[in-house]
Amino acid sequence: MQPVTSVTLPQPAGDLRIQYRIVGPGLLALLAGAWLLSEFGWQHATLFLVGGQLGVTLYHAAFGFTSAYRRMFVQRDVMAIRAQLLMLAAATVLFAPALSDGTAFDHPVVGAVAPHGIQVAVGAFIFGLGMQLGGGCGSRTLFTIGGGSARMVLTLFAFCAGSFVASLHMQ
């Protein structure tokens, strides 16, 4: 065996220059939203900024929950599923103490509990239908619409309709 002396990394396709016409207004909108939310306290503004940054990160990583499983079955690539498991572990470690204590940052915290029944099944079916027609799950729908995809509007509509139907308290 010969030793490897250099490694050639794959070059990204496309133009990677910063698109200031997109980044500038987006950054201004994010800062304006944080400024408007600061009226309700610094925590709201901070969470808005963190959420915006996480959204941009997920968008550029093309991170979706269903695509991770598609990659696992089609390409035998489990890295995205590992990332999901790491995210789940981090959320559990961060939120379990707050849920067991019942407070976080001097605010009451409880788990979300809602009645379930036929309305949840109907709502899930509506969302699943929109998800299949649009080609994305909930997280992918939100970040691709944020990236300008018009076809995901159908999925977002089905997502909202399904959530509304599932929230109805039918007996």
Image: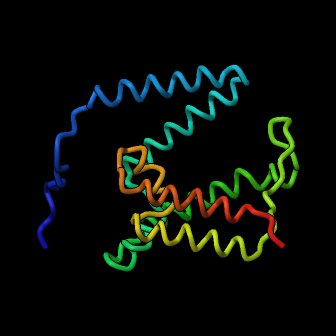
Quadrant occupied by the N terminus: bottom left
Identify the coloring.
rainbow
The residue depicted at 69 percent of the width and 24 percent of the height is 42
Q: Position of residue 83 (x, y in %)?
A: 49, 60
Apparent side of residue 102 relative to residue 90 in the rendered image (left or right):
right
Q: Quadrant of residue 78?
A: bottom left
Q: Nearer the viewer, residue 89 or 116?
A: 116
In the foreground, 64 or 115: 115
- Residue extending farthest to the bottom is 73
Is the residue 52 above or below the residue 64 in the image? above
Quarter placement of the C terminus: bottom right
Residue 21 falls in image quadrant: top left
Position of residue 58 measured from the top left corner of the image (x, y, whole percent): 44, 49
Q: Is residue 122 found left or right of 51 in the rendered image?
A: right
x, y percentage for residue 2?
A: 11, 68
Q: Is residue 86 above or below residue 145?
A: below
Viewer-closest of 123 and 64:
123
Q: Quadrant of residue 121?
A: bottom right
